[in-house]
Image (tube, coloured by chain):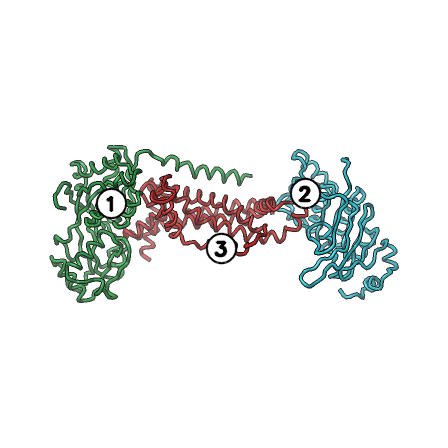
Amino acid sequence: MNSIAEAAAQAFGLILAADPNLVGIVLLSLQVSLASVTTACILGLPLGAAIAVNEFPGKRFVVVVLNALMGLPPVVVGLFVYLMLSRAGPLGVFGILFTPTAMVIAQTILIAPLMAALSRQVVADAWSEYREQLRSLGETRLGAGATLLWDLRFTLATLVMAGFGRAASEVGAVIIVGGNIDGVTRVMTTTIALETSKGDLPLALGLGFILLLIVFLLNAGAYVVKETAQRRYG
Amino acid sequence: MRARFSLLPLRLSDVVFTVGPRRIIDGISLQLDAGLRTVIIGPNGAGKSVLLRLCHGLLRPTGGSIDWNAPEIAGGARRQAMVFQRPVLLRRSALGNVTYALKLANVPMGEREERALEALRKVGLEAYANHSARVLSGGEQQRLALARVWALRPEVLFLDEPTASLDPGATQEIEKVIEALHAAGTKIVLVTHNLGQASRLGDEILFLHQGRLVERAPADRFLKQPASLEAAKFLEGELPW
Amino acid sequence: MVVARRAFVALLVALVPFAAQAQDKFITVASTTSTEQSGLFGFLLPVFQKKTGIQVRVVALGTGQALDVARRGDADVVFVHAKSAEEKFLSEGHGVKRYPVMYNDFVLIGPKSDPAKIAGGKDTLVALKKIQAAQAPFVSRGDRSGTHMAELTLWKDAGIEIDKSKGPWYRDTGQGMGPALNTASSLNAYVLADRGTWLAFKNRGGLAILVEGDKRLFNQYGVILVNPDKHPTVKKDLGQTFIDWLVSPEGQKLIADYKVGGEQLFFPNAGQPGV
């Protein structure tokens, strides 16, 4: 209990002091996670919708694989991306290992299946309700996917926040591909890992509180935006 | 008014529709012509909704053929439309739902809003143009579905029990709109359980029983004096649902 | 539409800083977690950057992992403390030349209650024999780090085949120095640690230094430029500048100046033969 109180005090102190190092770390965390979620949505949401509204041989297998990929262990993804981006690996020429870009790539790989699998489920449920009417109006499959994604935007907003939460909280992938380099690829989660391993548990926990606070604030903001919009468009 | 071949008459030849071992439509041949308001009635399970969907193109027959006089151009605007028992509306304004249908019909962007407003006016919903479609009442939503259809000016309109979930007041509103559509030149093909509605809206009646077309007659003659035994039983309420 | 616009702006905000970070002058140094956690880099590197404009990006891993990263060509310089592993690295052709830089020492940490009764001893080998005989809990890093390799050498020199005689008392954790100390603290176990990490470590619990000052606990650091002939993308000029600075009088003095809690952690010995 003592450490928790100490941690809360540390967190408060850090926030008040607006320590520039900490601010930099927080900003980088947000940048990496937001970029990852955005890319993952651009890739995953249309894919999920497309799978939902189309019939093709092996569809059920694809759905099972997609759902299974939601459980990709971050550290495995990190290792895979590291091997790909290493100078000794196939994509080494780009030299993006140990940069935030590598971290975004790893997190996108982690979250895109989540976005695809969840959107597929949500769109498929709606499709069974909308299918006859949309086909009757002459909608194509491609158009139906897009129309449904937009129609389900409030549900999808919650999914996107789930994806963001997963990105912001993971450490296994970003620490391997980013290298936790001070001032370059150090984010909140890797800093917490570092301080924990240094034995500075109150500081680590304090940073943990700050991370939770940030994620909470972002979720609250997203919720408010969603609610106001939903009230207008039902 | 563009000169083009009319979709009608629609010819069904020995149409069969099976699902697994069940023959839902068991060899129906008929022709639907322009002008008359056609009402399809029959007991539950007779295949009315399936027949409607086969004609509209949502289902493909397992056997036999369904031929329109002029084929619809693939990818072009639909010239026949359908209204379902429960209207499916998008999470947009009432106006937005109609302009969406117009977009699918390849109506140029500049014309859409005006045509949509006109359609809303025809069904008496112009005051709700910017309201969310989903907060409208059941009757208003169905009227919106009809407005959506009206904006498309289809040649044929299929309706699958459009007022089954509505109260008498709303039902009356919907029947008025259907009448107006007919007056504007759209062929009406209506499935209903409501015999009063059948007599109000129908010019001819198609009676379906166990997937077959058992009787076809002008509405008032059928309702007063059905020729077939099954029809007589049905009208007396004796035929099992 | 407002939503779409906000999302787009967020994306832009998200991506712009990455462009800014694509600096021209930086090198990647693969080093060890214990060196980083001692805080030495935070002290040295800003001075170096101010002087040369070169940003030094330190990836901190275990020694084995650091050398592997360099073998893959993902680092320009390695800065570790395991002479035999470094010489193997050189013999494989991955490095150009090894420069001794500094040394610190290991200390044998244990619970103040000291079940194996080794406190105050000056002979590490005797202490280890006592620990094994008492089957007192002992935490090993088990991660091919310099510290781990030093520990294994000490067991061997004490005449103990640790692979065979380890029982449940020997905890092979596969972790860095900090986590190993955390584990030792919670288990009240013995552990071999480098003095730097110990001085910076805050979660000591009931642990204290029990054996120190033995020459066998000497821990030499070396710095090596990754071989540009084998890995053409290595920034050899910038890397060599860093190495030259580390062994220069200025760099060496700075290393000696670094203190934690008033105590000097590292002892510069560049140019010393035989280390």
- Chain of the residue where label 3 is placed in the rendered structure: A
Q: Residue at x 72, y 60 (%)?
A: B24
Residue A92 percent across, percent down from the top left: 36, 42
Q: Tell which chain the image draws in red.
A: A
Instruction: Tell me, by letter, which chain the rendering colours green.
Output: C
Q: Position of residue A36 (x, y in %)?
A: 44, 44
Type of amino acid at the residue the image marks with label 1: Gly
Q: Give the residue drawn at x 30%, y 43%.
A: C73
Picture coordinates of residue C96, whole percent (x, y) = 22, 40
Check disc 2: other Cα within 10 Å, few if <14, some if 14-19, many if 20+. Answer: few
What separation in Å lies between label 2 and label 3 (alpha carbons)? 35 Å
Q: Quadrant of residue B216?
A: bottom right
Q: Which residue is mark 1?
A: C39
Identify the residue position indicated by label 2 in the image. B74
From the top left corner, tell me how far across and down residue C115 is, in percent: 18, 65
Chain B drawing hue: cyan
Are the residues at dot 2 and dot 1 in contact (C-beta closer than 8 Å)? no
Q: Please state which of the two labelled residues, at mark 2 or mark 3, is closer to the viewer.
A: 2
Left-right relation of C250 to B183:
left
- Residue topped by disc 3: A65
- Badge 3 marks a residue whose secondary structure is helix
